[in-house]
Image (tube, rainbow, N blue to C red):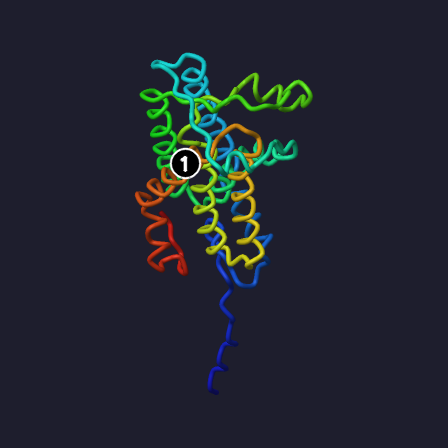
Amino acid sequence: MEPRPLPLIEPQSLEVYGSPGRSSSTLSRIGGRLRHWWWFKAMGTSLFMYVFFLAYLALLHHPLRPVFEMPLTWVDRQVGFQPWALVVYASLWIYVSLPAALAPGLKRLFSLGWHMGCLCGAGLLCYVFWPTVVPPAAVDWGLYPGYALLKGIDPGGNACPSLHVAAALYSALWLRRELRELQCSRVWHWANWLWSGLIVFSTLATKQHVLLDVVAGSVLAAVAAAFSPGLRRLRSGGGRGWITV
């Protein structure tokens, strides 16, 4: 008697560190990434922000050189104060946490942390050697409690380059990479760019920065991205496959 052939087994989609499987939904793939090492990511991100703010506020309140007031441009005069922009401005701290939260493994997490640290360090060095501040805005901050709190902590110093802009744009590039790996639809990608774009706009609408700060922050983000190995591979077409760095 001839042995009966074994039934064919369809290969199952494997998920290693949140690797995308076509049979799983977008939300389940994202959930897998968020759960992986979540406690380590949360502690690392919180520690990073704490150390950054210690250095940022020290330079803000105790500049080492004479403070230069940034000039206004035509764009700055056209963009009026927008009270609603404070919510978007503050959302940066959620937005910049997302690339770390979606990191598939420790190797990529450390790579992200290193390059984001270099970006922030470069900005802080600019504040050491060239402290800057935005011109006073013709706004009664006392009429807006949220803004009164913001201006009490950060009255518009450490202006150029805008690390708000640099961190938002750099995070957008990392999120683009993660969303491609997770096989997310275009809606997710558009939401990513819309969020980052609104954060950039909010720096002008809250009168925390001027256009020259935004331009300098954008350049800083571009330089940091140029030195990030994973982002270079993504631009060269490697983003379709699984990238672990």
Please tell me whether residue 40 is drawn above or below residue 230 in the rendered image: above
Q: Is residue 133 left or right of residue 111?
A: right
- Can residue 228 be seen here? The reply is yes
Residue visible at 38% across and 53% down in the picture: 243
Place residue 138 in its image quadrant: top right
The residue tagged 1 is 217
Q: Is residue 56 left or right of residue 87?
A: left
Front one among 25 and 88: 88
- Work out whether residue 235 or residue 69 is closer to the camera in this orientation and state it: 69
Q: Quadrant of residue 78?
A: top right
Image coords of residue 21 (percent x, y): 51, 60
Name the residue at 46% across, 18% down.
57
Q: Secondary structure at mark 1?
A: helix
Relative to 45, residue 242 above or below: below
Q: Is residue 51 visible?
A: no
Residue 75: x and y in percent read: 50, 38
Rendering quarter of residue 219: top left
Residue 153 or residue 208, whichever sits in front: 208
In the rendered image of this protein, does residue 185 appear above or below residue 53? below
**Residue 145 horizontal/vertical position (percent):** 67, 21
